[in-house]
Image (cartoon, rainbow, N blue to C red):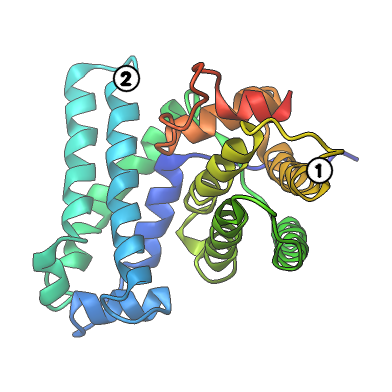
Amino acid sequence: MTNLVVLTDPARELAELCAALQVETNKTGETFLAGRFAVDPWSREFFEIIFTITERCGTLQDIVRDLEIDDDFRDEMVGHVNAIMAAFSAQAMRAQWKDVGNKHLSPINVGPLKALSASVRQRVAYRKLDTAELAEILEETGNLLDWLREHQLEEQDFIRQAMIEGLERFQFRLERLAWLGWGYTLDSLREIIAAYMLLEREGIDPQDNPNAAAVLKKVGSVIQSVYERVATAKGVVETGDWLLKAYGAGSLVYQTGRPLIAGLLT
């Protein structure tokens, strides 16, 4: 029996995020959101989350503008996303959440995103992983983190450190902020892939530099494993490059212009 593949997309994920934050509370926006994110108000993690949410709103608007839909419907959808973005503005942070932020996340603005999801999914879609699959990824990345911490590079060890920091952020999102959406977690792989490509461009010879060669092999294997899990009907290579482009990593390419994921997975 084949397991049912559940797909999601940026519109659906944003709608689910907003629904999770539709709470009547007298707390200020900054206090409420920090509590939901399990971070300190205005900490680095708090800023990162707020910025990422608004960035993903902008990404969704870009996707909507590129859809083959009527102009009035397109403008209406972009307007709803603008209203949602206002829930994470400085004004909403200072005010009581129920008076500003929660109102911007009302069904009036969020409901249309669910209807839009089918159209967006024709352009950007990825698998929605279940609890067991997420646990497997956490174990894989945890094992890789432990291994990287024990194996230094003789030259340019800052690349290994960049991979470690990227993996730590990836795990933080996966463990504590999964409810923000799988696309949000995938976004944090950009730093790991950028470091991987930087190391690969050095032209590693396994005989001359076995540690660096081993790092490339192990890191590449984990990245490939993650993207194989989210691949849909499209090939793994196409899915990976397509997801990175959707989440703002289009600038991370070889100097030759070769797509990141294509270079990594082929």
- Which residue is tagged 1? 3
Q: Is residue 126 left or right of residue 98?
A: right
Q: Quadrant of residue 12?
A: top left
Who is closer to the viewer here, 134 or 194? Answer: 194
Q: Quadrant of residue 32?
A: bottom left
Who is closer to the viewer here, 103 or 54? Answer: 54
- Which residue is tagged 2? 66
Specify the amino acid type for callout 2: Asp
Characterize the local packing of mark 1: few (<14), some (14-19) or many (20 or more) Cα atoms within 10 angstroms.
few
Q: Is residue 93 left or right of residue 9?
A: left
Who is closer to the viewer here, 54 or 204? Answer: 204
Q: Quadrant of residue 19?
A: bottom left
Mark whose residue sits in front, 1 or 2: 2
Characterize the local packing of mark 2: few (<14), some (14-19) or many (20 or more) Cα atoms within 10 angstroms.
few
* Count of numbered labels shown in the rendering: 2
Q: Secondary structure at mark 2?
A: loop
Q: Are marks 1 and 2 in contact (CB under 8 Å)?
A: no
Task: Please tell me which residue is depicted at 34% across the width and 19% down the height of the picture.
Answer: 67
Task: Please tell me which residue is depicted at 24% across the width and 48% down the height of the picture.
Answer: 109
Residue reaching furthest to the bottom: 26
On the image, the x and y values in percent for residue 75 come to: 17, 28
Lower sequence index among marks 1 and 2: 1
Task: Please tell me which residue is depicted at 69% across the width and 24% down the height of the picture.
Answer: 233
Q: Secondary structure at mark 1?
A: loop
Q: Quadrant of the C terminus?
A: top right
On the image, the x and y values in percent for residue 86 come to: 16, 55
